[in-house]
Image (spheres, helix red, strand yellow):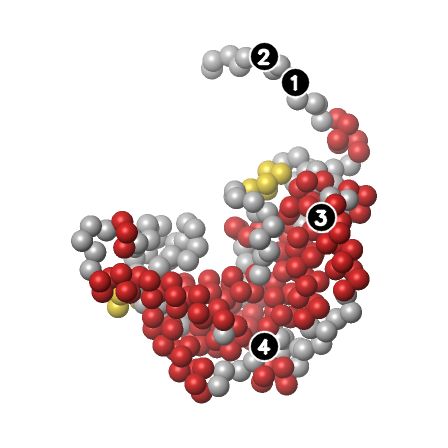
Amino acid sequence: MLGSTGAAQQEAATEAQKKEILQLIEDLALSEKKAPEGMVLPPDPPELIDNVSDAYRKKYEGCHAAFKKLSTYKKAAFPFLLEHLDDERQSLAFRNHSLSQSVGAACFWNIYYQLQDRPQNYSSYGWSREGRDGKQHPKPCWVGTPFDDAGGLTEWMKQNQQLSYPEMQIKCLEWLLEKEKTIGAADAASYFENILPLEIRILERKVETGAEVKEDLARLRSALSQKNEAMIPAALLPSKNSRDAKPAPEKNPPPKRAP
C-alpha cells in the first residue's frame, strides 16, 4: 500500500511545480473584483457577448485551461488549493447550479472532482432517483460531500494527509458507494447504473495501490458487461413481497380527469 510518509513525500510539489501551480491559481481569477453571492448565472462565454474584447476572451479561456491543468498535478497541488479556499475573486462556476463563482470555490471543486473520481457510466442526469423502497431519494453527489463529516475539506485533508492520491480517491468513492447502497436499487438496471460502476472504480484504484484485487475487478467488469443479475446482493433490491405488491402498469390507462 502507498499510504505512507514516503508516498506523501513523493507526491509533494517541487519548487518549479509550486511556482506553476501558484500561477495557475492566479489564472483562475477572471476578475480581481469580489465574486457575487447567491445563485447567479456564470459570466457569459465569449461567444455569447457582442463585441467581446480579446482580453476577456483570453481571461475566460485561460481560466478553464488553468482549472484543467491544476488537476494534472494531483496531490501536489492540494496544499496550495487549500490555501486559496477563501479567495473571493471572481472566477467561473465549475459546477452546475453553483452558489459561488469565486476562485476559492474553483479550488474546492478542483479537489472535489479529482477525489470523488466518479466513472462516466455511473448514474445519469437528474437530482434524484428511485430507491429499493420505491421512493425518490436525492442523489448523494448533490446533497453532500465526503468532507462534511470531518468538518470541511481542510480538516478532511489534515485527517487523511498520510494517504496517497489513489487512497484518497478510494476513501471518497467508498463514502459515495455507502450512500448509494443505503438508497438501494429499484431494480437490476438501477444497480448496474448507480452502484456497480462505483464498486469497479474502487477496485481500479486499489490496483494502483498494489492491492491484489485484479480477479475481483475482472469478475465485476464481466458482471456489468453481461448485466448478470444473479450477482446482485438481494439486500440492495426490493424484497420479493414488495415487488409482487407493486401493480403492473396498465397497457391502456384511462384518460385522466381534469382537476
Which residue matches tag 2?
254
Mark toward the start of the polypeptide (4 vs 2): 4
Depth check: 145 or 67 in front?
67
Which amino acid type is shown beneath numbered disc 4? Gln
Q: CA distance from mark 2 to mark 3?
A: 39 Å
Q: Position of residue 259 (x, y in %)?
A: 47, 15
Which residue matches tag 3?
225
Q: On the image, which quarter does residue 34 sit in?
A: bottom left
Q: Could you tell me which residue is drawn at 78 percent across and 36 percent down?
A: 239
Q: Is residue 195 left or right of residue 41?
A: right
Res 247 visible: yes
Q: CA distance from mark 4 to mark 1?
A: 56 Å
Q: On the image, which quarter does residue 159 sit in?
A: bottom right
Marking on residue 180: none
- Give the mark toward the camera: 4 or 1: 1
Which amino acid type is shown beneath numbered disc 2? Pro
Q: Could you tell me which residue is drawn at 58 percent across and 77 percent down?
A: 161
Q: Position of residue 205 (x, y in %)?
A: 66, 66
Which residue matches tag 1?
250
Res 132 visible: no
Question: Quarter of the image containing the N terminus?
Answer: bottom right
Question: Where 78 falls versus 145 (above or below)?
Answer: below
